[in-house]
Amino acid sequence: MKIIDLRRDTITRPNKKMREMAFAADLGDSVYGEDPEHQALEQQAAEKLGKEASLFLPSGTMGNLTAVLTHTRRGDEIILEKNAHIRTSETGGAAAVGGLSINTVPGPYGLPDPAGVENAVRADNIHYPRTGLVCGEMSHYRYGGIVAPLPGLKELYTLCRKKQIPLHLDGARIFNAALYLGVDVREITKHTDSVMVSLSKGLGAPVGSMLCGTADFIEKAKRYRKMLGGGMRQTGWLCACGREALSDENIALLKIDHANAKKLALGLNSIEGFSVDMERVHTNYVVAETAFSQGQLASLTAYAEGRSVLLNPPRGGTLRFVISREVTDRDIDSALQVIDNFTKEAKAD
C-alpha cells in the first residue's frame, strides 16, 4: 500500500528529467570554479531571482547563516519576526557562530512589522549593540505557509533603506509565494538585499539551496560558505538537478500542490471537530484547529500511520499538513477518509 506522507514537502523526489540531466552532467572541482553545471546553476539562479550573483549551498540553514554572517559583524543584533525559522529552527547558529543577539518583532504574516522594526532599531549609543540586519520569511513555515502582502514587504524594505540596514529574506519556498501572489518572483526579491531559496523542498532537487545578492555580497559569502563546510567539490550532478528545479515548467507544478492543499482544507472542514481558516490556505500548507485534545490527536496520528497515512505530531489541538507532488488528488481523498473514519469511531466509543 502506498504511504501518503502529509508531514513535509522535503520528500519530493527528483523527476525523470532531473535524473537524466544529473548523470549526463560534466564534472569539475567547484571550489576552484571548474564545475560547469555549478557555474551554470549560479548564473541561472541569479537571473531567475533578479540579483547580480548567487551561491550554491548544501542547505537552506547554511544559506541563511551564510547570509547573516556576511551582512553583520560579531556583537551586532539582528531583528526577526518572533517565530522566524532562523530563530526557532536553525539551532541558534546566529548566536553560536556569529556572536549575534536577536531582537524579535511580531508580524501577522511572518514579516516583522515595519513600525515594530523602527522601534527596535538601536540608537547609536555605546551601551547598545548595533542593529546589523533585518530578516523576513516568505512563505512562513510556522504560520502554515502564509504569504505576506507585497506592500508590507515594500514598506519594510523602504524602512531598511532609510535606516541603512540590509534586509535578508528567508525565501525557502519563495516560488510558492510568487505563485500565490500571481507575480514574477523578482517582484518579491527586488524588495530585498539578499534572498535564500531552497531547491530541495517542493521543487524536487535532492540537495541544495541558493543564496542570491549583489556580486560583492556573494564574493564575501563564499568565505563563510567555506568556513561552514559548504565548499563542495564535484557538484555537477546536484547542480544539474537544481537547474531543472528552477525551470519554469517545474516551478509551475507547485500550483498542483496548492490546489491539493485547498482540497484537503475543504475536506477537513466537512469533518466534525476540524476547522480550517480558508483565508490562510495560501500555498501547500494546511493548519487545522480541532476540538480534540493533544492526546486524542496523538491517537489519530497512530491510527492514520497504521493505515499508511503519515501526519505531523499535534501541537495542542492543532494539526499541520504539508502537501508535495508525491501526494496526488486521490491520496487526499484517501487521507480524508482515514481521518473521517477515526473521528466517527472515536465518537462511537
Image (cartoon, rainbow, N blue to C red):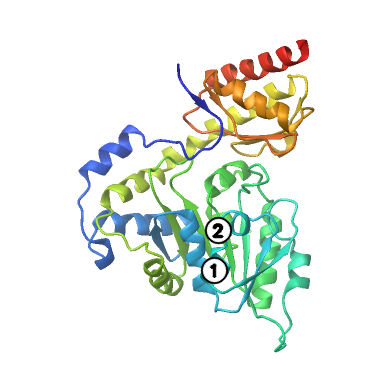
* CA distance separating discs 2 and 1: 9 Å
Q: Are marks 2 and 1 in contact (CB under 8 Å)?
A: yes
Q: Amino acid at mark 2?
A: Thr
User: In this picture, is 343 found above or below 148?
Assistant: above
Question: Looking at the picture, how far across and down is residue 260, in whole percent?
Answer: 58, 27
Q: Which residue is mark 1?
A: 96
Q: Residue furthest top?
A: 348
Question: Looking at the picture, how far across and down is residue 299, in whole percent?
Answer: 66, 25
Q: Residue furthest bottom?
A: 126
**Quadrant containing the N terminus in the rendered view:** top left
Count of picture labels: 2
- Give me the disc on residue 91: 2
Q: Residues within 10 Å of mark 1 (few under 14, many from 20)?
A: few
User: In this picture, is 269 found above or below 224?
Assistant: above
Residue at screen point 69% across, 28% down: 297
161 or 143: which is nearer to us?
A: 143
User: In this picture, is 184 found above or below 275?
Assistant: below
Residue at screen point 32% across, 48% down: 238
Q: Amino acid at mark 1?
A: Ala
345 or 337: which is nearer to us?
A: 345
Q: Residues within 10 Å of mark 2 (few under 14, many from 20)?
A: few
- Give me the disc on residue 36: none
**Quadrant containing the C terminus in the rendered view:** top right
Disc with the residue nearer the chain's start (2 vs 1): 2
Question: Looking at the picture, how far across and down is residue 144, in whole percent?
Answer: 66, 42
- Res. 47 visible in picture: no
